[in-house]
Image (cartoon, rainbow, N blue to C red):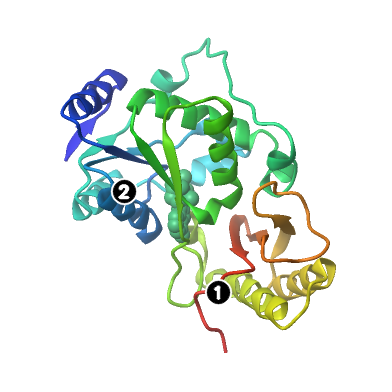
């Protein structure tokens, strides 16, 4: 695996591959890699001839300094995981090269895609995400990028951005990877104390319950969201949001249907976890 730590190096490498007629896949990450990240890389390796992975903890998408400071780093461990999926190139870069002091130009999403869910509580978060993803797309120049459904709103916004700004890249989303007990994998899970780790299962369990309730005929969103709220609060979490939204517009739904996605964000102590599920799909884990 090549390790490029400047924009010029990764650009030259990808350009060379493309000149040779190779299709280049790209998985942007913030590191502390887990099986969820690796599943995106495997999907990219299947679909493309070469895989570039970026590891960059983007400061402009964090709205709390303590959250940025606590974000886990493990570059050596990450490199071994990248080798295990036959990644062809790792791209890392310094903050000063990404955001020079006189940095001025941002990509700012507006409208229904950013109005609800994480957009409500995390202020400028998506402005940071769309700006860094645009920069990474421009720097790497890949043919196709892969994202996780776990960050459902993020993918919806990036997909729209690529269309709206005519960015010449294809984007694909891949299913959420979970622990055997249902917890969605996240780099933040390692920050959970063991008691909170156990209690945090309430998120996945309540999503699974919502899918079952919908399948049994419950279509009143408020009833489903209230019961989920109760279950997650009973596990000791502070809820940021629980919403039922349309899978494309992300507008809130009053009546649930097959296009509905239920999305949750909740704090277990200081750790904020997110998860979501589309109602038309089976929840992948059976809970007793
Ligand atoms: P992050 O490092 O958190 O920025 O995530 C990098 C990519 O991995 C994003 O596209 C995420 O949606 C994706 N991802 C994170 N967790 C999971 C998961 N449990 N399953 C699938 N993809 C994931």
Q: Nearer the viewer, residue 198 or 230?
A: 230
Q: Could you tell me which residue is drawn at 55 percent across and 74 percent down?
A: 283
* Residue for badge 2: 44
x%, y% of residue 242? 73, 60
Left or right: where 138 falls relative to 21: right
- Which mark sits nearer the N-terminus, 1 or 2? 2
At numbered mark 1, what does the secondary structure look like: helix, strand or loop? loop
Q: Nearer the viewer, residue 181 or 108?
A: 108
x%, y% of residue 86? 19, 50
* Quarter of the rendering occupied by the C terminus: bottom right
At numbered mark 2, what does the secondary structure look like: helix, strand or loop? helix
Q: Could you tell me which residue is drawn at 72 percent across and 66 percent down?
A: 257
| Picture layout, residue 194 above or below residue 80 | below
Image mark for residue 283: 1
Q: Residue 108: name its quadrant.
A: top right
x%, y% of residue 6? 28, 22
Q: Residue 277: name its quadrant.
A: bottom right
x%, y% of residue 127? 61, 30
């Amino acid at each position: 695996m090549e390790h490029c730590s400047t924009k010029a190096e990764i650009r030259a490498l990808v350009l060379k591959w493309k000149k040779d007629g190779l299709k280049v896949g790209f998985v942007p990450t913030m590191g502390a890699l887990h099986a969820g990240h690796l599943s995106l890389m495997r999907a990219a390796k299947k679909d493309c001839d070469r895989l570039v992975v970026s590891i960059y903890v983007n400061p402009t998408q964090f709205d709390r300094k303590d959250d940025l400071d606590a974000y886990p780093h493990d570059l050596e461990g990450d490199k071994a995981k990248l080798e295990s999926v036959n990644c062809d190139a790792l791209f890392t870069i310094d903050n000063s090269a990404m955001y020079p002091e006189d940095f001025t130009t941002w990509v700012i999403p507006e409208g229904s895609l950013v109005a609800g869910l994480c957009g409500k509580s995390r202020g400028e978060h998506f402005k940071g995400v769309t700006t860094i993803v645009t920069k990474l797309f421009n720097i790497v120049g890949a043919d196709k990028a892969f994202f996780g459904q776990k960050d459902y709103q993020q993918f919806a916004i990036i997909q729209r951005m690529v269309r709206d700004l005519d960015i010449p890249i294809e984007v694909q989303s891949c299913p959420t990877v979970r622990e055997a007990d249902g917890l969605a994998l996240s780099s933040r899970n390692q920050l959970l104390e063991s008691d909170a780790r156990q209690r945090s299962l309430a998120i996945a369990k309540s999503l699974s319950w919502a899918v079952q309730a919908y399948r049994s005929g419950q279509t009143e969103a408020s009833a489903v969201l209230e019961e989920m709220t109760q279950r997650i609060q009973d596990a000791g979490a502070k809820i940021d949001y629980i919403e039922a939204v349309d899978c494309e517009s992300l507008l809130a739904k009053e009546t649930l249907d097959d296009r509905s996605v239920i999305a949750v964000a909740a704090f277990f102590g200081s750790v904020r976890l997110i998860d979501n599920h589309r109602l038309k799909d089976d929840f992948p884990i059976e809970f007793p």
